[in-house]
Amino acid sequence: MKFQDKAQMAAPEALYQMPEKGRSCDDVIADVRELKKGMTPGQRGKLASTTFQGQEEMQKVLHEAFIEFMDWNGLFSFQEASAAKMENEVLDICIDTMNGGEQGRGNLTVGGTESNFSGLHAMRKWARENRPEITEPEIVAPYSTHSTVHKTAQYLDLKVITTPQNADLSADLEGIARSIGPNTIGIVGSAPNWPYGTVDPIEEFGQLAIEHNLWLHVDACVGGYILPFFRELGVEMPRYDFTVPGVRSISADLHKYGYAPKPCSTILWRSQEEQQYHFMPIDQWACGLYLSQGFVGSRTMGPVAGIWALMHYWGREGYLENARRVLHVKESIINKCAQIDGLTTWKTNGPLLMIAAEGFSIELVVGGMEERGWRLLGVNNPPAIHLTLDVMEDEYLQKFMQDLEEICADIRAGKLTSEGMLSYGGVGDKSTAPKWLLSAVEIMEKRAG
């Protein structure tokens, strides 16, 4: 986590007060719209996982379906046949997309963090029953595994053993095999991993899992609902789903390339045998059995209605066409970078794309693009720009590529020297940062001495 100006660290001392008197609906909504104007527009400035685009009519379908169910609590979908119908049909489609077949099972979650939490929680619960001799459980994963795996492991008191990447940034299969020990309960692979955009060797991980009696969880939060369509379009794609023996659980975000309204994700299971370790039925209280889809209890039904509506509006053909358009954006940027002196792109398996620099700092590119309104994420090790590609109108795609070319020319000419933030959660100005983040950074700095 970095800040451009450490002097701006101090948060305001006075707390914001609730207004004494209310205001008109039109007046307040006008302020809300004004605040929204201050946000970075989607495809005009972001190539990150905070925004996914779509045609105007597609957005209309999503938003109207969301609003219809926005106030309805998804915790109680068991009480309403209509809510259950939407959940069942969405999950059936997701299971089918992962080749789960009739044995496959699934649960809706509110995001990739909860999905990965659910997969690792089930892994731990399974190990307690099937590997009772292990009292200090460990999981093995490549260095490229997502931060939410480490976050989950801290919550669940699991030790994560990570193995360095190969020189080409791929997962070190031999390193994974060597790291399996007497306390190992599972392996985590990615499809694709977030930092480098490549699908781990899941088939080989599956063989190791079977050989050593381990649980294999696949984090497909990014690729789960677009890689199958890339494959259908002829893109070579490693296997990672339930066709791979040994895979027991898969996390996949519907609010990424499924295009569901946020927050919406899935945790999918090979069968009910694996799903049994997910549920936490509670009956030690006064109101009888308490049971929920996942860790989260109350949740809006809006995202489920939104994704149900989109799946029926687009159909498979719509998702396939969307994947085709994302591939066009990816290929266009790769080809453009090949023409820009000093820029290189990494080979990736899916919709993520990394841009690195030779001969100058890639952070200079980030800083220059920031000045032109592009909010870019990055990889720190090794340094690169991290793009979460999406459909872009040609006007904005061309502008992005033109800005990239001009910024690099300015760097080579010595006209640009200010660096930008190159990190997953970089924040430029403390005066506008969320207070929780300021507090977290302050706590970390105090602990670091």
Image: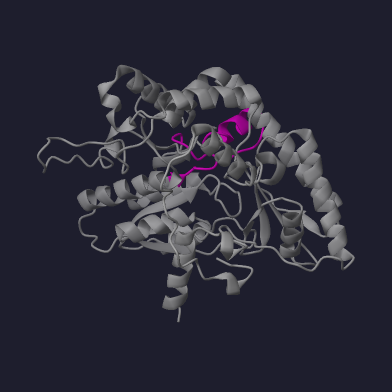
Which percent across, then down, holds residue 104? 36, 30
For this orientation, the residue located farthest to the bottom is 449
For this orientation, the residue located farthest to the front is 21
Left or right: residue 133 compared with residue 358: left
Q: Is residue 405 visible?
A: yes
Quarter containing the C terminus: bottom left
Colouring rule applied to residues: one colour
Image quadrant assignment for residue 361: bottom right
Which percent across, then down, holds residue 77? 30, 26
Q: Is residue 334 above or below residue 304?
A: below
Viewer-closest of 404 and 351: 404
Q: Which range is magenta?
A: 218-243
Which percent across, then down, holds residue 377? 63, 54
Q: Is residue 190 above or below residue 442?
A: above
Left or right: residue 443 compared with residue 28: left
- Quick check: is 237 in the magenta stretch? yes
Left or right: residue 275 compared with residue 18: left
Which residue is at a point 46% across and 26% down the rendered structure image? 67
Q: Is residue 140 visible?
A: no
